[in-house]
Image (tube, rainbow, N blue to C red):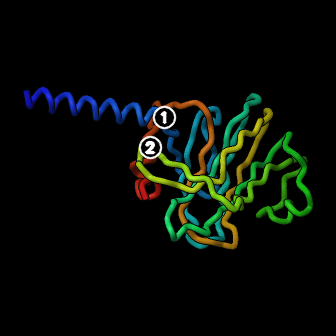
Amino acid sequence: MRSFLRKSALTFLVFGTVVAIAHAHRPGTLQADTTVSNPYVSWVFPGVFETGDELFILRLNMERAFATPFELFVPRQEAYREFRPQYAIVGPGLPKPSRQVEALLPKPLPDGAGVYYEANDKPEREVFFEQVMRRSMWSSGTIAIPLRKGNYQIWIWSKDKQKGKFQFGFGVEEKFDGEAFTAIFSNWGLYAY
């Protein structure tokens, strides 16, 4: 009977883990300049502002129009209470920024590009509980942006040159083929803080 209970518990644990992972984003590795291999699936990219001067760029080549949600997270820890990285989505079909917004961007816009700018400055920060790693994060809030066919960049930078960990997530469809989980294990310290 004990053997049966152990096997049942193990089966439940494995099944529960698989179900939980099925609701997670596909992991990526965020470098200073990263090209997203498939912008039509769900991704999460961890990063660290070690000096606060870094500018992370995600490049998306949209071969067709597609609307997708975007969100930036930081660990919900006291050390990160005032840490609010910013991001901008830059590319065709987005609104032309005001002079005030353009002055806040970390670099000049490419010719003809519009921008969606996220200041991440809401007084009440949204809290997101991530079920797989069992942790709580502050979120910039989720916003779905319709993208046209064309090349886009997502710029992520640190407001006031603050240092700290963050994650940037976007996408709607799960896809875990190939080496999908390699980045989680190679960057475990960034995912599981």
For disc 2, the marked residue is: 131
Residue drawn 63% across the image and 45% down it: 35
Which quarter of the rendering shows the C terminus? bottom left
99 relative position to 86: left or right = right
Identify whether 176 is placed above or below 182: above
Question: Of helix, strand and loop, which one carries label 1?
Answer: loop
Q: Earlier in the sequence, mark 2 or mark 1?
A: 1
The crowd level at tag 2 (other Cα within 10 Å; few <14, some 14-19, many 20+) is few
Q: Position of residue 47 (x, y in %)?
A: 55, 58
Q: Position of residue 6 (x, y in %)?
A: 15, 33
For disc 1, the marked residue is: 23
Callout 2 amino acid: Gln
Q: Position of residue 4 (x, y in %)?
A: 12, 26
Callout 1 amino acid: His
Identify whether 157 is placed above or below 191: below
Question: Of helix, strand and loop, which one carries label 2?
Answer: loop
Q: Specify the label residue 33 is tagged with.
A: none
